[in-house]
Amino acid sequence: MSSQKTKINASDLIYPVFVKDGLKEKEFIKGFPGTYRYCLNDLPTVIRKCEEFGISGVLVFGIPIKKDDMGTCAYSSDGVVVQAVRKIKECYDITVYVDVCLCAYTSHGHCGVLTGDDIDNEKTLPLLAKAAVSYAEAGADYVAPSAMIAGQVKAIRGALDESDNYRVKIMGYSAKFASHFYGPFREAMDSKPSQGPKDRIGYQLDYHDRSQALAGIKSDIEAGADIVMVKPAMPYLDVIVEARQKFDILLAAYQVSGEYAMVKSLDDPGALYESLIAIKRAGADFIISYGAVELLEYLNENRNKGE
Ligand code: PBG
């Protein structure tokens, strides 16, 4: 009988990196062990490790100095992410993914522009498209719209093509649930909704309903996504399995901040390994995890010990 053993390779992993504008040295994040907000100058060291291990890519998140109701710093020409992408690409040949959303940049913490208490799709789409084009022009390989605003993939693909950024691809956060597992991330980004609706249930998916998730994946594929994603990962392995069976496209799964913090609390690198094996076994081609680098360190150590 042939072996069916699931393995994880560095080329399966994408490592998320937080970059904060104006920071002088890396900052500890409350409730988010092993993860930091980095300053621009830290990036070469952080990325060098990823490149040495052969990690598939990094997913960049920016934290601006100032927030406003339109999320202006998300799409300004010298925004922190634009600077970060340029710096990474100057030093390393690694695939750069950039998250496209307004929540870290808006004073109210929502992923789109608010009109009254409602997320205003029409006003938000051009801003997301503008942000995506600015990241593309800085050198990003993939833009990854995570705002869950209907029509975001189509609007971004259109704007990329119109600005001659055909080479830039899209990883859609296609099945993103309104999850309780995003807490440490919102602490890192200071992006908890503080005005308007108290949560993101109005625009993220209901976790009681798997069919919505599959419909989200289908519509992102139709809109031109190159990679689709299920997020979070561990509580949604059934969705990963079904997406794998139904769609012939690259599939990413995001082990989000709360999942990672939970796994880390066990203080056993084997638990991290096991959790990522489960996600791979379910059928993900790419796994986005805050534990990507430490997992590879752990696997190397074990290999050296001959285990
Ligand atoms: C932005 C966004 C979120 C995450 C990635 N991009 C969370 C949210 O909806 O607040 C979550 C990632 C994580 O928890 O690690 N919209």
Image (tube, rainbow, N blue to C red):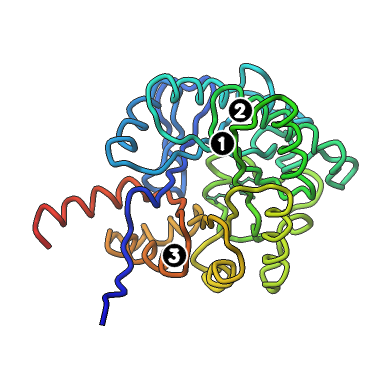
- Identify the image quadrant of the C terminus: bottom left
State the SS at label 2: helix
Q: Residue at x 52, y 55 (%)?
A: 252
| Front position in the image: 10 or 289 | 10
- The residue identified by callout 2 is 135
The picture places residue 124, in percent across and down from the top left corner, at: 80, 37
217 relative to 202 in the view: left or right: left
Q: Residue at x 27, y 77 (%)?
A: 2
- The answer to whether the residue bearing label 2 lies less than 8 angstroms from the nearest atom of ligand 1 is no
- Identify the image quadrant of the N terminus: bottom left
- The residue identified by callout 1 is 98
State the SS at label 3: helix
Q: Residue at x 68, y 66 (%)?
A: 214
Q: Amino acid at mark 3?
A: Ile
Q: Which mark is residue 279?
A: 3
State the SS at label 1: strand
The picture places residue 33, in percent across and down from the top left corner, at: 39, 48
Direction left: furthest residue: 305
Q: Which mark is residue 225?
A: none
